[in-house]
Image: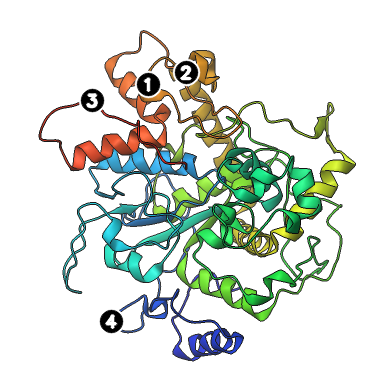
Amino acid sequence: MAWTMRLWRPRSLGVALGVFMTIGFGLQFLGGSFQRRLPGLQLRQSWVPSLGSTVKSCLPRQRLVFLKTHKSGSSSVLNLLHRYGDQQGLRFALPAHYQFGYPKLFQASKVKGYHPQSADTQKPFHILCHHMRFNLKEVLQVMPSDSFFFSIVRDPAALARSAFSYYKSVSSAFRKAPSLAAFLSNPQAFYRPGARGNHYARNLLWFDFGLPSPPETKTMKVSPQLPRDPKSLQLHIVPSGASPGTLFRPVTTAADSYKQPASLVSSDFRPSSFIQWGLAWLDSVFDLVMVAEYFDESLVLLADALCWSLDDVVGFMHNAQAGKKQSLIRTANKTVVTGEDQQLTKQARAWNNLDWALYIHFNRSLWARIEQYGRSRLQRAVAELRARREALAKRCLVGGEALDPKYIADAKLRPLQFGSAKVLGYVLQSGLNQKDKEECERLATPELQYKDKLDAKQFPPTVSSPLKTSRLLSP
């Protein structure tokens, strides 16, 4: 697989364009995306894992575009970007409120302080990372074309569970359904394309990536099973009921066991040419796509790709929901998945067929990257990352873990409560010295409050006033 170099080939892109036009869709959503490396075609910076020495021979990447997908662990990634940019004095491309006009496609005009510039003018922003529906042409009006583009995906079965709980009040499809099981057993009884909030109810990842829905979506079926191809890369999947938002030891991951689950049997997974084209296009744009079920492994690869230290990516989980009833029965040495949960998982993946294709693709690409990085090396790095996280938790947090919001008296640390499940947050230890207190506050600050802090830093108010998060939009 060609991992170390991506060449913008007019011939290859012409084929992709031809496929896209043959399918019959307009190119409006592309917005000139095939010419991302203007003016002229250029080689993308190759990705080569660092040699593992303590002295970095590379320069840290500081021009970053993070597509913050919904209910995929992206709030935790956002916190590390907030902290890094804040400490490095970098400028963020910030929305006027908390999102860039979502669910509409991103527009450069939505960036606070943005002014159209000529092509040879240095763009003033370093990091673009808040909620948007991806629109490459407009993103490139704000960020340099050599920025590091990355995002994160999650198993659509786990995402569906989280989204149903979180967005039930804003999605008409979810609101009509008495339960997620009832919805997935007959989604057409509740779901109407284009209805208010219904982008949350089907193929939410595909939507966030800015890709159009093909006309065959109504009838196209992508099998929720996997092909048994001994030549293909292994697909590693944890039980979909397990949350990637677990605070310190998410789930047993690659660093602990690299065996492919035996339950992933062969089936007829052949995405349409449209889906294949969409995935190829995303590969040409994004330098890395993380996987929520392998969050720590993804963080190690992110640090390596950006030439950052592990300390730059260590942090706490944010926007995790509490009290979610798991249909997993944990025994001493293994996890047992109930038949009801297996059925729901199968239905969720089939209903969110485009997201399942995305997940399979980027799960495999992550593991190809892990193979290049080295599994034993990854295992050591993940263990070190977790040890640092646990040490920070003991030093910073009351109880060393996330708490019910009723215990969080400090408004600066209390996360927005939205949806039917409580969103957990953090309480800082008392008696911290000033340096530790500042570091711990950065680690514990929720995304909305941190955005307000960055906003006040970049656009100082004329009259000093406390930060406000009263007009909050749903994440």
From the viewer's perspective, is the residue at label 2 or at label 3 nearer? 3
The numbered mark, 3 or 1, whose residue comes first in the sequence reads: 1
**Nearer the observer, 372 or 71:** 71
Amino acid type at mark 3: Pro
Task: Please give the label number shown on residue 466.
Answer: 3
Amino acid type at mark 2: Leu
The numbered mark, 3 or 4, whose residue comes first in the sequence reads: 4
Q: Are marks 1 and 2 in contact (CB under 8 Å)?
A: no
Q: Secondary structure at mark 3?
A: loop
Which residue lies at the image location 42% right of the left edge and 32% below the top edge? Answer: 446
From the viewer's perspective, is the residue at label 3 or at label 4 nearer? 3
Is residue 180 toward the left or the right of residue 388 in the image?
right
Cα separation between marks 1 and 2:
16 Å
Residue 425 pos. (x, y %): 49, 25
Amino acid type at mark 1: Ala
When asked about the image quadrant of residue 164, the answer is top right
The numbered mark, 1 or 4, whose residue comes first in the sequence reads: 4
